Amino acid sequence: MKILLLGKGGQVGWELQRSLAPLGELVALDFDSTDLCGDLSKPEELAQTVRRVAPTVIVNAAAHTAVDKAESEPDFARALNAQGVGALAREAQALGAWMVHYSTDYVFDGTGSAPWTEDSPTGPLSVYGRTKLEGEQLLRQECARHLIFRTSWVYAARGQNFAKTMLRLAAEHDRLTVVDDQFGAPTGAELLADVTALALHRTRAAAGAALAGLYHLAAGGETSWHGYARFVIDFAQHGGMALKAVGDAVQAVPSSAFKAAAPRPANSRLDTRKLRDTFGLVLPHWQTGVARMLTETLQRSA
Ligand SMILES: NC(=O)c1ccc[n+]([C@@H]2O[C@H](COP(=O)([O-])OP(=O)(O)OC[C@H]3O[C@@H](n4cnc5c(N)ncnc54)[C@H](OP(=O)(O)O)[C@@H]3O)[C@@H](O)[C@H]2O)c1
């Protein structure tokens, strides 16, 4: 395989650099790469990059992920999340290449409590959700050999994440308030990257083309942001971290307690049966990955 990876410095992109390496030659770019253009907002230059690299697989981990900011710059969000994806997809199709792409629970309106399947009706509430949905649609139209992984609540050990923010706030304040009416599964960038590599490996088989499609990919189980925060803080406290806000001092509040530019879906549960059955995979419980990430974080800060 010759793999062109976009968004190499992001949460998922960073882990993909590790997980994709054993599959073949990897050309990894960011939006400010100099030799080759990896900027999703420049479709012409991006197309030239694909023609020069001539990959057998394009993996796009780049996106406009600033959910609230996207509300005030919808054209830019669309350029990255939809038009840039469309440009890559057309080039992938011209080469007969596979294209892997990531999408989001934000394509749903968040009603009800049942996990969303790949066939559930979409209804994005935000610019981010709408532009990500457009990106999915363009990819499906333009490139036959596509893998789209919709995921939720992504975290990574590298850089900032919700868990680290909660630990910082719990160390600084006597009391924390965290939303308890949005539900989903925190999903590690490591898991997304590993599943991507396993899925791509499977596409090499004779019947690989039949694997093309849209899949929900999230860690097992579910929680609220409040449940997530409580798990993180309890884990760190038991690991010996000095925290002020622990136990009941981590209080549950409704989403209405926080003002955000972009509405969040209340129900972000994703039904992952299709992915598990198609690829014969087990998706570990969200606490497994979060505990691992916290262990590494706590060891590093010790
Ligand atoms: N994060 C989540 O909770 C979440 C949930 C569901 C789905 N997803 C999806 O999962 C995928 C990966 O997300 P992530 O969490 O890894 O996001 P991320 O950490 O924000 O990474 C996105 C990457 O895209 C880069 N980028 C920004 N503008 C660009 C441009 N014009 N051209 C090319 N690259 C550009 C960013 O660079 P800079 O950092 O330098 O700006 C960053 O490296 C995305 O498709 C996202 O929509 C994420």
Image (tube, rainbow, N blue to C red):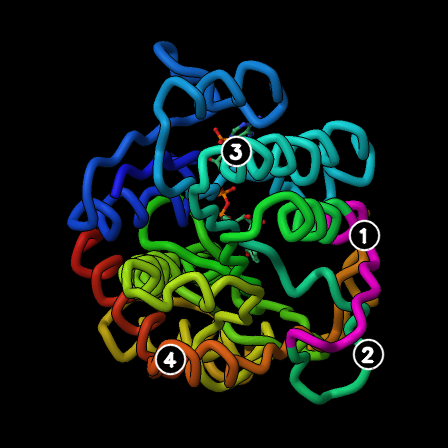
Query: Label 4: few (<14), some or many (≥20) within 10 Å?
Result: some
Q: On screen, 72 above or below 57? A: above
Q: Earlier in the sequence, mark 1 or mark 4?
A: 1
- Which residue position is annotated with label 1? 126
Q: Earlier in the sequence, mark 2 or mark 1?
A: 2
Marks 2 and 1, how far apart at CA: 14 Å
The crowding category of the residue bearing disc 2, from other C-alpha atoms within 10 Å (few below 14, some 14 to 19, many at least 20), is: few
Say which mark, if any, is on residue 283: 4
Q: Nearer the viewer, mark 1 or mark 4?
A: 4
Q: Which element type, helix, strand or loop, lies under badge 3?
A: helix
Say whether disc 1 or disc 3 marks the residue closer to the N-terminus: 3
Q: Which residue is mark 3?
A: 94
Task: Label 2, secondary structure: give it.
Answer: loop
Q: Is residue 192 magenta?
A: no
User: From the viewer's perspective, is 126 left or right of 30?
Assistant: right
Task: Pinpoint residue 132: horizontal percent, then vertical percent.
Answer: 69, 49
Marks 1 and 3 in Cβ contact (< 8 Å): no
Percent from the top left, x then y, of residue 237? 32, 75
